[in-house]
């Protein structure tokens, strides 16, 4: 988690206060007793509705990008306040006579349209206390680029999918970033603050994992210098053997998870499915989100199963990375088992009822 909210603020400055935070997370800004939400909240191109993209985009922007530059001990997080929904909506549109600020190209031929490349833009502000007020000390911008484009050749006709090459994703993302930086610098409040821009490749519409950040840059002026490349991959486990064989670390993780899955499915008959999302950086596992779907009906079954999950996780799942296991049925979440980053201790909680 990159951002933790508490019930009340623990710092105050004028009409602002801040939330509490857990270790390694940011405090966030509260104004007049209310959490300060983004001025462009929820704006995205209606092209890719894979919900995993939005979650991984927001989490990664904080945990992978922002924390490289803005320490959780020294900076306070604020949702974006300098790009409003109207501005972001226009930027995500196609460039036309009526919308000259559009970052996406004009449609072109209806039968073979130009893709909508830029899918989403998010602003995050990083603040520090200065006397009795909060001062803006940096801005992080995430730009999500589509990896595929869906279109119709005629109204009510079938949908076609056009794959966008990795080279196009890179070039279109960097071109959009240069324009966004120049526009941000035109705002008086943002003329001199450090601006970090990160580029994210959206996963496809039917993907069971979100996309990944692939490059970032920090700009002190109004032009972008060099980019730093990132090598993240997301995967669904267990993998097919042919897919896993491309990387020995990946193969080991998939095999360990397959053993875990087999163990709990053999022990308890009422298991509908066991899947996981795994993230790798430079080929090394960074963490896992596991989902176990059950058909349990009694609280005693859930209690027993959760205890068994803890034992199986200790025995089969990889060490040294954060892992959470969500145990659920059609009626909702029944229990959770988890191990924090850097810890060897597994924790669990079973959701009961009064």
Image: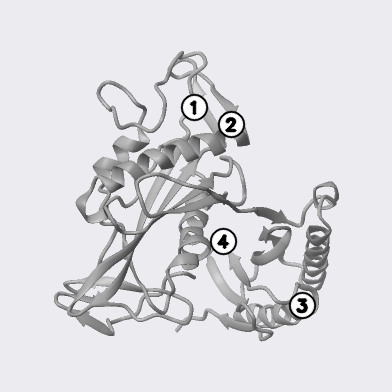
Give the camera-side residue of 179 and 118. Answer: 179
Q: Position of residue 173 (x, y in %)?
A: 49, 39
For marks 2 and 1 on the same chain, the one whose residue lies earlier in the sequence = 1
Residue 312's tag is 3
Judged from the image, the secondary structure of the residue bearing numbered disc 4 is: loop
Question: Is residue 61 shown to the viewer in this render?
Answer: yes
Mark 3 and mark 4 in contact (Cβ < 8 Å)?
no
In the displayed structure image, the side of residue 317 where residue 94 appears, left or right:
left
Cα separation between marks 1 and 4: 38 Å
Cα separation between marks 4 and 3: 23 Å
- Say which residue label 2 marks: 164
Residue with the most extreme left position = 14
Cα separation between marks 2 and 4: 36 Å
* Badge 4 density bin: few <14, some 14–19, many ≥20, Cα 10 Å: few
Judged from the image, the secondary structure of the residue bearing numbered disc 3 is: helix
What residue is shown at x 35% (from left), y 81% (from top)? Answer: 20
Residue 18's tag is none
Displayed quadrant of residue 253: bottom right
Q: Position of residue 78 (x, y in %)?
A: 31, 65
- Say which residue label 4 marks: 330
Mark 1 and mark 2 in contact (Cβ < 8 Å)?
yes
User: How did the renderer colour the structure?
Assistant: one colour
- Say which residue label 1 marks: 115
Judged from the image, the secondary structure of the residue bearing numbered disc 1 is: loop
What residue is shown at x 84% (from left), y 58% (from top)? Answer: 248
């Amino acid at each position: 988690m990159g951002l933790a909210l508490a019930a009340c603020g623990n710092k105050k400055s004028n009409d602002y206060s801040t939330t509490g935070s857990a270790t390694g997370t940011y405090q966030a800004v509260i104004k007049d007793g209310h959490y300060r939400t983004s001025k462009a909240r929820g704006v995205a191109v209606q092209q890719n509705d894979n919900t995993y993209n939005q979650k991984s985009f927001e989490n990664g922007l904080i945990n992978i990008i922002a924390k490289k530059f803005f320490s959780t001990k020294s900076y306070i997080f604020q949702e974006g306040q300098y790009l409003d929904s109207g501005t972001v909506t226009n930027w995500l549109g196609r460039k036309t006579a009526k919308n000259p600020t559009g970052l996406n190209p004009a449609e072109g031929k209806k039968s073979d349209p130009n893709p909508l490349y830029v899918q989403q833009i998010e602003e995050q502000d990083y603040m520090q206390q200065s006397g009795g007020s909060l001062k803006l000390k940096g801005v992080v911008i995430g730009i999500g680029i589509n990896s595929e484009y869906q279109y119709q050749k005629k109204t009510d006709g079938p949908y076609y999918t056009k794959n966008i090459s990795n080279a196009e994703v890179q070039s279109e993302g960097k071109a959009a970033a240069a324009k966004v930086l120049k526009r941000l610098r035109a705002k008086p409040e943002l003329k001199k603050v450090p601006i970090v821009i990160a580029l994210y490749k959206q996963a496809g519409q039917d993907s069971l994992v979100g996309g990944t950040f692939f490059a970032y840059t920090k700009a002190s002026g109004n032009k972008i210098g060099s980019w730093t490349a990132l090598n993240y991959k997301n995967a669904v486990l267990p993998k097919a053997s042919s897919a896993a064989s491309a990387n020995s670390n990946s193969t080991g993780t998939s095999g360990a998870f397959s053993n875990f899955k087999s163990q709990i499915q053999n022990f308890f008959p009422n298991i509908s499915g066991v899947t996981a999302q795994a993230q790798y950086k430079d080929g090394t596992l960074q963490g896992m989100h596991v989902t176990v779907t059950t058909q349990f009906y009694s609280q005693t079954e859930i209690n027993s199963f959760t205890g068994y999950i803890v034992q199986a996780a200790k025995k089969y799942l990889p060490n040294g990375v954060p892992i959470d296991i969500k145990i659920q049925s059609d009626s909702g979440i029944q229990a959770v088992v988890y191990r924090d980053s850097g810890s060897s201790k597994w924790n669990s909680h079973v959701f009961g009822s009064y």
